[in-house]
Image (cartoon, rainbow, N blue to C red):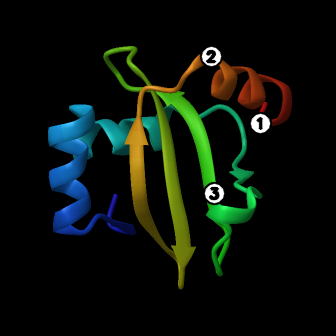
Amino acid sequence: MNALVISQPVLDKLKAKHGVARREIEQCFDNREGGFLMDEREDHRTDPPTLWFIAPTNGNRLLKVVFIAIDGRVHIKTAYAPNDTEIGIYERHGK
């Protein structure tokens, strides 16, 4: 995925804190079945808006992927295993 941008500090955090690799994020985009949701929480609002989705990797690991779209490129903010609340929100509003 050429349009995927992940800064080195974010890559380091993803690996150290969440055990997530770039390839897993790419797989989630490929395997996504629902749409993108906008993070509308006051302390998480950004311009452009922060978007997110939940999808499985090819190894069936479920990840929440959080990103910002800028000029046709996807800038990853974070990715991690979602909690039950996040899964419920995505099931109700993202699919």
> Whole-percent x and y of residue 94?
77, 36
Say which element carries label 2: helix
According to the picture, the residue beneath numbered tag 1 turns out to be 94
Image quadrant where one finds the C terminus: top right
In 3D space, how far apart are the residues under numbered discs 1 and 3 (Cα atoms)?
11 Å
**Mark toward the start of the polypeptide (2 vs 1):** 2
> Whole-percent x and y of residue 37?
73, 49
Q: How crowded is mark 3: few (under 14 residues within 10 Å), some or many (20 or more)?
A: many
Q: Which of 12 and 63 is in front in this view?
A: 12
Q: Residues within 10 Å of mark 1 (few under 14, many from 20)?
A: some
**Mark toward the start of the polypeptide (1 vs 3):** 3
Residue 91 visible in image: yes
In 3D space, how far apart are the residues under numbered discs 2 and 3 (Cα atoms)?
18 Å
The type of residue carrying mark 3 is Leu
Proximity of marks 2 and 1: CB atoms separated by less than 8 Å: no
Q: Is residue 75 above or below residue 15?
A: below
The image quarter in which residue 50 lies: bottom right
**Mark toward the start of the polypeptide (2 vs 3):** 3
Query: Residue 51 — which label?
Result: 3
Q: Which residue lies furthest to the front in this view?
A: 43
Q: Is residue 87 above or below residue 35?
A: above
Judged left or right of residue 61, residue 48 is right
Say which element carries label 3: strand
In 3D space, how far apart are the residues under numbered discs 2 and 1 (Cα atoms)?
14 Å
Q: Which residue is drawn at 29% across and 64% down?
A: 6
* In this view, the mark in front (2 or 1): 2
Judged left or right of residue 68, residue 78 is left
According to the picture, the residue beneath numbered tag 2 turns out to be 84
Q: Residue at x 38, y 26 (%)?
A: 57
